Image (tube, rainbow, N blue to C red):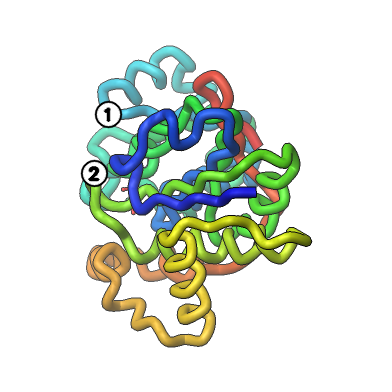
Amino acid sequence: MQITTYPFPQAITEKHFYGKTAIVVDVLRATTSIVEALKNGATQVITARDPAEAMAFYSHFGKKDSVLAGERGGLRIADFELGNSPLEFSEKVVKDKTVVICTTNGTQAIHACRGASRLLIGAMRNRAAVAKEALKQGEDITIICAGTLGECSLDDVIASGGILNAIIKQLEVSPELNDFSSICLSLYSSWRKGEIEMSGITHYKKLFELGFIEDLSFCFELDKTDVVPKYSNGSIKG
Ligand code: MLT
């Protein structure tokens, strides 16, 4: 089995995930928020590429049955009900509703990978569960970090390493890894040993400065849920 990890979706085209199981990771915070929304009873999550598309989806599903969420620069988009803090996607807010979400990098990464054989949404909180699900079909696996506007983001690298670590633990034969997968694994191991200064990570620092302090610890908690969001025909369900 081959497992290939990429630092951002701009590094790949359809050939990189065609016929494979893909996992998109935007640990801070889009994929964590999607996991949380489905864990708390949302019927589905619809990702939009920009605020106008999100508004159009929201009008389609209607105010009664849907919730409009998203961020720009880490902050809630004007006139949207929710931002992109996973803590906002509580049962009270999302249960039995369609969540329409638009974020700067995470929802773009999901859109870029929609041609994969299977597309799963990964985070630290569903790490072991997404690893188990990824192995179900026995296909090669592509992990795509959302990154930040075409640049590598260390938070996603650590989280992808965590998912890789959980996948490898479940395999009897070592998989073939690309070099970036090995980098992710190594940085995850350093993170586990407390060797990474999190406040030095650009997006971590930005969210800290914006006051999303609780989000930072929440997003980096390991294996808190078995919910594995799966994308199919424009909709993500748990
Ligand atoms: C994104 O998609 O760029 C992020 O999830 C940003 C954020 O932390 O809200």
Residue 79, image x and y in percent? 27, 33
- On residue 51, the disc is 1
Residue 207, image x and y in percent? 29, 63
Foreground of the two, 78 or 168: 168
The answer to whether one can see residue 219 in this image is no
Foreground of the two, 85 or 121: 121
Residue 83, image x and y in percent? 35, 45
Q: Residue at x 40, y 34 (%)?
A: 101
Q: Which element type, helix, strand or loop, lies under badge 1? A: helix
- On residue 72, the disc is 2
The answer to whether one can see residue 209 in this image is yes
Mark 1: C-beta under 8 Å from nearest atom of ligand 1: no
Query: Relative to residue 202, is residue 10 depicted above or below?
Result: above
- On residue 64, the disc is none
The quadrant in which residue 187 appears is bottom left
Q: Residue at x 50, y 21 (%)?
A: 234
The quadrant in which residue 107 appears is top left
